[in-house]
């Protein structure tokens, strides 16, 4: 049984104060197995973040169902299994990374001693230990991203959903996140992440889905199915052209 | 439960470290100092004036705090998407509302406790020189009045929760909360005026029905205003504290439940 199951999911957004509708996702069907690293590709506005928000029940599908470990994503307990890093994470300005992780641990019913131990371990790994008592508003973009990763990992989730985890990071930061995803893969975690950096997806993922204008256009086993001599980037551009480009 | 309490704690911490709060506290401290100076200009009822000014300062400072910091804390969650940080964890939307409400209540309680204690200094100082005036003053009623200011502010927090759960911008939420505050502070006076049935005053049945509806729908905030009793050392009517507290529990429960229901329906794209 797949760990993440997205079954014929569509999402239509209605504009406020007008009848204009935007079909952000068109009957998306997708399965992700346990322990798999799954890349989610697509140009801006393709529906990647919409899919992720549906998986977290931040928005609800217009039709179709999403389940994780056999449970509907609307069930609160599902999110105990998930660690989520949003694209451009925002946190409370006056909290420190240590307090942020305390909230992350407490909201998942972790004991104080476990939170303490995991906080130090994660912040050391993510090189935030010296800044852990500083307010988050004094952090650089890369540091905020790493604090977000620590929050996603504090409760040792079995599934990581990362929305553009490399976004805005300098080369060193990207390397750090890359190594972290590799480590999670080795630990047998399921990682679902969206990224524009196709080279990273090619190196990290078992499978990748290409989403264009809300539709799934190709599902590739990155390690086996890439046409010979072609990179994922070339396949991606071919698919964008075949789909007739991007809608406005 | 851990989700609610941990959210309440970080909401409290985020609020208590807000620089606007320090500005409000400094303004309140200056007003308390001014109370001592101003009362020296009066010849009689000195302690009554000091108590009344002190309670007005607490009430006004608290109102600024809950309206501006409370609205900002809630709406920023939605505007800046910090709500993702909470709702992506095993915390339901209803728990989010309750957690935020409790956090803001802790903030209101801590701030009013601080201001309440400080406010007793000008009353005490004024009382030293005017023992006769102090003789009718009752500290118990004074601190019950401070407690009721805290309850009023928490009730306003529940109104902020409701508006923030149905509107999409902090400005609209702020305006609607201020509107509720103004109506809630005056509706008892308007209803009293209506009940007097003054001869020659022509009020249509429709207007009477509207005023009655407004009276029952909007919170009666004047019920939490005990300045008059505290300043004059009047004892409170039998059961007043109990019945007003029950009214508070009921109104707050309705507002928070309505906010939780509205929040359950919302999406955060």
Image: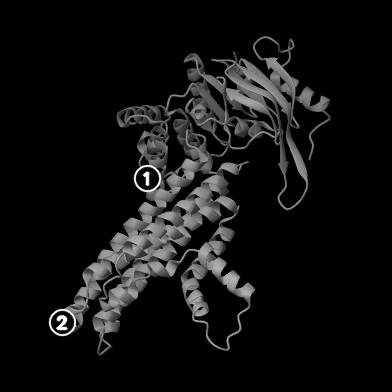
Name the residue tied to disc 1.
B9
Going from N to C along the chain, the mark reached first, 2 or 1, is 1
Q: Crowding at label 2, few (<14), some or many (≥20) Cα neighbours within 10 Å?
A: few
Classify residue B31 as left or right of residue B262.
Answer: left
Quadrant the C terminus of chain B occupies: top right
Asked whether, in this view, residue A131 is left or right of residue A166, the answer is left
Residue receiving disc 2:
B131
Q: Mark 2 lies on which chain?
A: B
Residue at 27% x, 80% y: name it.
B48
Residue A60 placement: quadrant: top right
Residue drawn at point x = 53 percent, y = 33 percent: A85
Front in this rendered view, residue B158 or A58:
B158
Snapshot quadrant of residue A45: top right
Q: Is residue B80 visible in this depiction of the protein? A: no
From where the camera sits, is residue A71 visible? yes
Say what secondary structure mark 2 lies in: helix
Residue A67 vs B21, above or below: the answer is above
Chain hosting mark 1: B
Q: Measured from the top left, where is residue B15 in percent x and y?
A: 40, 53
Number of marks: 2
């Amino acid at each position: 049984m797949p760990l993440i199951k997205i079954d014929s999911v569509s999402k239509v957004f209605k504009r406020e104060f007008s009848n204009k509708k935007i079909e952000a996702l068109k009957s998306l069907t997708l399965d992700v197995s346990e322990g798999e690293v799954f890349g989610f590709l697509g140009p801006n506005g393709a529906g990647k973040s919409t899919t992720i928000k549906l998986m977290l029940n931040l928005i609800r599908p217009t039709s179709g169902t999403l389940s994780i470990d056999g449970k509907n994503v609307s069930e609160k307990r599902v999110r105990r299994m998930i660690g989520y890093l949003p694209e451009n994470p925002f946190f409370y300005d006056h909290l420190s990374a240590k307090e942020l992780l305390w909230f992350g641990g407490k909201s998942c019913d972790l004991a104080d001693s476990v939170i303490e131990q995991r906080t130090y371990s994660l912040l050391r790994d993510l090189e935030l230990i010296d800044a852990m008592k500083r307010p988050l508003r004094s952090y650089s973009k890369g540091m905020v991203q790493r604090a977000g990763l620590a929050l996603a990992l504090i409760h040792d989730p079995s599934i990581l959903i990362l929305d553009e985890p490399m976004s805005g990071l300098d080369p060193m930061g990207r390397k750090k996140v890359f190594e972290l995803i590799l480590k999670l893969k080795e630990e047998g975690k399921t990682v679902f992440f969206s990224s524009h950096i196709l080279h990273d997806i090619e190196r990290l993922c078992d499978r990748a889905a290409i989403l264009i204008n809300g539709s799934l256009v190709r599902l590739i086993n990155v390690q086996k199915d890439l046409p010979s001599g072609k990179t994922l980037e070339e396949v991606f551009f071919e698919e964008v052209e075949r789909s007739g480009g991007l809608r406005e | 439960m851990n989700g609610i309490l941990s959210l309440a704690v970080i909401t409290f911490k985020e609020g208590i470290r807000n620089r606007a709060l320090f500005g409000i506290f400094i303004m309140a401290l200056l007003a308390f100092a001014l109370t001592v100076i101003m009362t020296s200009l009066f010849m009689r009822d000195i302690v009554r004036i000091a108590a009344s000014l002190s309670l007005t300062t607490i009430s006004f400072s608290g109102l600024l705090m809950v309206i501006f910091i409370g609205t900002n804390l809630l709406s920023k969650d939605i505007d800046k998407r910090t709500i993702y940080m909470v709702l992506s964890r095993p915390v339901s939307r209803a728990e989010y509302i309750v957690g935020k409400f409790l956090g803001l209540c802790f903030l209101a309680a801590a701030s009013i406790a601080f201001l309440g204690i400080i406010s007793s200094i000008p009353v005490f100082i004024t009382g030293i020189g005017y023992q006769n005036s102090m003789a009718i003053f009752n500290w118990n009623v004074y601190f019950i009045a401070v407690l009721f200011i805290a309850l009023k502010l928490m009730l306003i927090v529940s109104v902020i929760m409701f508006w923030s759960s149905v509107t999409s911008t902090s400005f609209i939420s702020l305006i609607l909360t201020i509107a509720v505050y103004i109506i809630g502070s005056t509706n008892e006076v308007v209803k009293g005026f209506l009940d007097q049935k003054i001869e020659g005053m022509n009020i249509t049945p429709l207007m009477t029905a509207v005023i009655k509806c407004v009276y029952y729908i909007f919170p009666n905030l004047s019920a939490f205003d005990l300045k008059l009793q505290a300043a004059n050392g009047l004892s409170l009517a039998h059961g007043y504290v109990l019945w007003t507290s029950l009214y508070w529990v009921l109104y707050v429960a309705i507002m928070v439940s309505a906010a939780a229901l509205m929040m359950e329906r919302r999406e955060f794209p």
